[in-house]
Image (tube, helix red, strand yellow):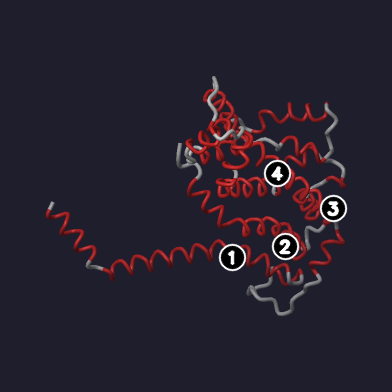
Amino acid sequence: METAVHSRGIRKENPALHRILRSILWILLILLTVFTLIPFVWMISSSLKLDREVFAFPMRWIPENFHWENYSLIWQKVPLVTYFKNTAFIAIVVTLLQTLTSSFAAYAFAKLNFRGRDVLFLCYIGTIAVPWQAYMLPQFIMMRSIGLYDTLWAMVVLQAFSAFGVFLMRQFYRSIPTELCEAARLDGLSEYGIWARIMLPLSKAAIATLVIFTFVNTWNDYMGPMIYLTRDINKTVQVGLRRFIQENSSDYHLIMAASLCSLLPVSVVFLCLQRYFIEGIATSGLKG
């Protein structure tokens, strides 16, 4: 006992050691951040160069002349505006639907008592472990049979429900005291009212987390649009980028400019919701 107290006293009396360890941690974090940002900085730099300057040696991180016209040329090579509109439509609609369906189902699994609730929840969550390739063909046949093949609504219908979203929201809902729901029921509030007026306002962090995950995954989806969307008028940004690369395989400066444009919407969404996202990561999935 005396040894432990003495050891704590020694640790408290060594602020210099604490500062050194903290400085080392900060240095490591800064180096890791720089290492992570290097590819993005190189992409931005390359997008403002001529093609012959991209792989010039020694590498020039800051171009001698900034060629902003690269960003106007990419819109003339392929119909990127159409690709962006299609992707924005799919990403926004899917994000709204997944947020609605996931939060609504999560409320039932977290706050309502009915027979087979936990078994049904485990079965639904178990679908996360099933690889997409296992049911890709049945999904394709189903979409074609109901007439949604080669339409944007095929991508919306396939991604409107998310087992991960239900799990994320349920874990957060379970951290909200059940007494709030019981008090609302005594006041005559319906289950729909409890969900809309109590659960949703208290779940901003979890909703923001789900919105970011859903929007990013939908925006970056490549295989789904590649399979279900064949006409050029229906293609998305990721498929359009592939076509752009095939047609301009030697124009690396234009490829970097197009890639940077495709990243901007995702970056804006994350930066707007990052505060809630960090809070949601810290709270969701830890309780229950």
Q: Residue furthest bottom?
A: 64
Q: Considering the numbered disc 4 on the image, is that residue within a helix, a strand or a loop?
A: helix
Seen at 34% across and 65% down, the residue is 21
> Which of the two discs, 4 and 2, labels the residue nearer the N terminus?
4
In the depicted structure, whether residue 179 falls above or below residue 72: above
Q: Closer to the camera, 178 or 99?
A: 178
Pointer 1 with pointer 2, Cβ within 8 A = no
Amino acid type shown at disc 4: Leu
Alpha-carbon distance for marks 3 and 1? 31 Å
Alpha-carbon distance for marks 4 and 1? 34 Å
Q: Closer to the camera, 214 or 118?
A: 118
Q: Considering the numbered disc 3 on the image, is that residue within a helix, a strand or a loop?
A: helix
Seen at 37% across and 66% down, the residue is 22
Seen at 58% across and 64% down, the residue is 37
In the image, which disc is placed on residue 96?
A: 4
Q: Considering the numbered disc 1 on the image, is that residue within a helix, a strand or a loop?
A: helix
> Which of the two discs, 3 and 4, labels the residue nearer the N terminus?
3
In the image, which disc is placed on residue 82?
A: 3
Residue 95 appears at what percent x and percent y?
69, 45
User: Callout 3: few (<14), some (14-19), or many (20+) C-alpha neighbours within 10 Å?
Assistant: some
User: Callout 4: few (<14), some (14-19), or many (20+) C-alpha neighbours within 10 Å?
Assistant: some
Q: Badge 1 is on which residue?
A: 38
Q: Residue furthest left?
A: 2
Alpha-carbon distance for marks 4 and 2? 31 Å
Alpha-carbon distance for marks 3 and 4? 21 Å
Pointer 3 with pointer 2, Cβ within 8 A = no
- Eye-nearest disc, 3 or 4: 4
In the depicted structure, whether residue 168 falls above or below residue 48: above
> Which of the two discs, 3 and 1, labels the residue nearer the N terminus?
1
Pointer 3 with pointer 4, Cβ within 8 A = no
Q: Badge 2 is on which residue?
A: 256
In the depicted structure, whether residue 181 falls above or below residue 23: above
